[in-house]
Amino acid sequence: MTKRQGRLFFIICTLISATAFIGLTVDSHRRFPGLTNEDKLTPEIIRGKDVWHNNNCINCHTLLGEGGYYAPDLTKITQQRGTPYLTAFLKDPSQFYSEEKHRRLMPNPKLSDAEISEVITFLDWVGHIDNQGWPPRPIIVSGTTIPGTDVGQSPTHASVSTDPVAQGEALFRSSPPACNACHSIASGVNLAGPSLAGLATRAAAIIASPEYKGEAKTPTDYIRESITHPSAYLVPGAMYSANSQSFMPDNFAVDLEPQQIDSLVAYLETLK
């Protein structure tokens, strides 16, 4: 290749690269309003963003992969934990975690009820941004795992097996619904939700107890009811409910397909 040919090759390659870069940039900005649900921005969401920044939440947490990696990523937190849980958590984080027992501690931001509602609304808006699957992992604490659980591990993908139990186990560890972000299957290891170890055995005792006011007649019914109507029976403990409402998200009856719920029930029934 001569000098002239080399120069011409460089110029052509540069022009092609620049054209591709400009084209992708223009296309990205063209799609941003749709991907971010820009039309759904409200004054409350804007105030929630201000609460987020004024309290330097981003110094510890990440959103869309940006921020401090000291504390869990909160991009999908409203879908993983739900408004009742987040409201109670922000009012008094120490009720849920202790530095000594859980090796994690969040300071009390001392937010007003209005500020808590606004920042949760902001996080919910963030959670509905089409982020193309980013970040790839559900809520975790950077650099740590909890013994006896798979917290901190990458989520699994849908099982290729046709076995409902295998499909349910894969779904349990998939995000969404990221059941394993709140529940362990190890005995005595309680995360945001209670351990599910021995659930099928425990379900029969719960149904027979006078405290149970739900409609389930069998352990299978109880497990299904716990997924679709989590407030039907409140597991004792201030970490799990308040004001007769479970902190578990109540949207799974709508967001999950009936076949997915059947698979989850089939898997959870094996936890005896």
Image (spheres, rainbow, N blue to C red):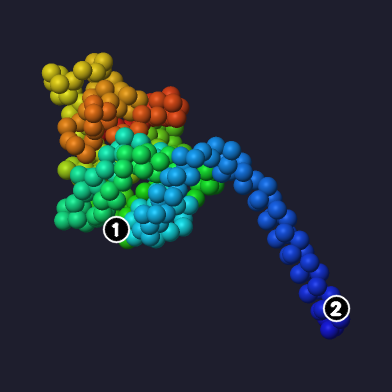
67 over 3 or under it: above or below:
above
Q: Earlier in the sequence, mark 1 or mark 2?
A: 2
Residue 121 horizontal/vertical position (percent):
43, 39
Instruction: State left or right for residue 101 relative to residue 157.
Output: left
104 over 12 or under it: above or below:
above
Residue 267 horizontal/vertical position (percent):
32, 32
Q: Nearer the viewer, residue 229 or 119?
A: 119
Residue 197 horizontal/vertical position (percent):
21, 38
Which element is circle 2 on? helix
Q: Residue at x 17, y 43 (%)?
A: 188
Find out whether the residues at labels 1 and 2 contact each other: C-beta distance under 8 Å.
no
User: Which mark, residue 202?
Assistant: none
User: How many numbered discs sit on the rendered protein?
Assistant: 2
Quadrant the C terminus occupies: top left
Residue 185 horizontal/vertical position (percent):
25, 41
Picture quadrant of residue 177: top left
Q: Residue at x 23, y 26 (%)?
A: 244
Q: Nearer the viewer, residue 263 or 207?
A: 207
Q: Nearer the viewer, mark 1 or mark 2?
A: 1
Q: Amino acid at mark 2?
A: Gln
Q: Amino acid at mark 1?
A: Thr
User: Which mark, residue 144?
Assistant: 1
Which residue position holds label 2?
5
Q: Residue at x 73, y 65 (%)?
A: 17
Picture quadrant of residue 230: top left
Q: Is residue 173 visible?
A: no
Instruction: Count neighbours of disc 1 (C-alpha within 10 A) and say few if under 14, some if 14 to 19, many if 20 or more.
Output: few
For the residues labelled 1 and 2, the Cα–Cα distance comes to: 55 Å
Instruction: Count neighbours of disc 2 (C-alpha within 10 A) and say few if under 14, some if 14 to 19, many if 20 or more.
Output: few
Which element is circle 1 on? loop
Instruction: State left or right for residue 133 relative to residue 111.
Output: right
Q: Residue at x 43, y 45 (%)?
A: 48
